[in-house]
Each structure stands twice: as C-alpha cells, then as structure tokens.
Amino acid sequence: MFTYMLRPVLGFIEWWSGLTPWFRLGVPVALLALSGILLAFGYVFVVGWGLGIVLLLFSGRSDAEKKGYHF
C-alpha cells in the first residue's frame, strides 16, 4: 500500500551501502563531531545528531563484504 513511499528510502540505503567503508563511517562521524562542536558553543543541531546516528547505523559492512566479496 505504501511501497511507493519506501522506494526513495530503499534507493538511498542501496546507494549508501555501495560507497567505500571509509566514506560510510566518515560522514556520520563528521556530522556527530560538528553537532558536538556546535553544542559546545550553545547551539543544538538536532538534524546533525539524527542523521549522524541513522547513517552510522547503516554504515556497517554488508554480509557480502563480511564474506570477502567486493563488487
């Protein structure tokens, strides 16, 4: 019923999983670091915290990468 709403999300996850592991870890860590720096100066950057945590959850190695396959 709502599969048309999930297509962009699933497409983004597929694109994100195809990037290099350093990039997949670097972007969320940079967002979290930026959010922490802004918090130290008194600004709360909720979007940075949210995106950083969500992207960090999806930055792990896939099952194929764990088995040694590289596409």
Image (cartoon, grey):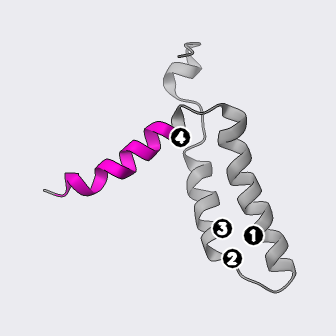
Measured Cα–Cα span from mark 1 to mark 3: 6 Å
Q: Quadrant of residue 13?
A: top left
- Segment tinted magenta in the rendering: 2-15
Measured Cα–Cα span from mark 3 to mark 2: 5 Å
Q: Residue furthest top?
A: 68
Q: Residue furthest left?
A: 1
Check residue 14 for magenta coloring: yes
Any mark on residue 35, and which? Answer: 1
Point out the tag, 4 or 1, that comes first from the N-terminus.
4
Point out the tag, 1 or 3, that comes first from the N-terminus.
1
Asked whether, in this view, residue 48 is left or right of residue 40, the answer is left
Q: In the rendered structure, are the residues bearing label 1 and label 3 in contact, judged by CB atoms less than 8 Å apart?
A: yes
Q: Which residue is mark 4?
A: 16
Q: Amino acid at mark 2?
A: Phe
Q: Secondary structure beneath disc 1?
A: helix
Q: Amino acid at mark 1?
A: Ser
Q: Which residue is mark 2?
A: 45
Measured Cα–Cα span from mark 2 to mark 4: 23 Å
Q: In the rendered structure, are the residues bearing label 4 and label 1 in contact, judged by CB atoms less than 8 Å apart?
A: no
Answer above or below: position of 26 versus 51: above
Point out the tag, 4 or 3, that comes first from the N-terminus.
4
Q: For label 4, count other residues whose C-alpha is less than 10 Å away and answer few (under 14), some (14-19) or many (20+).
A: some
Q: Secondary structure beneath disc 3?
A: helix
Q: For label 1, count other residues whose C-alpha is less than 10 Å away and answer few (under 14), some (14-19) or many (20+).
A: many
Q: Dividing the image into 4 quarters, which one contains the N terminus?
A: bottom left
Q: In the rendered structure, are the residues bearing label 2 and label 1 in contact, judged by CB atoms less than 8 Å apart?
A: yes
Q: Which residue is mark 3?
A: 48
Q: Secondary structure beneath disc 4?
A: helix
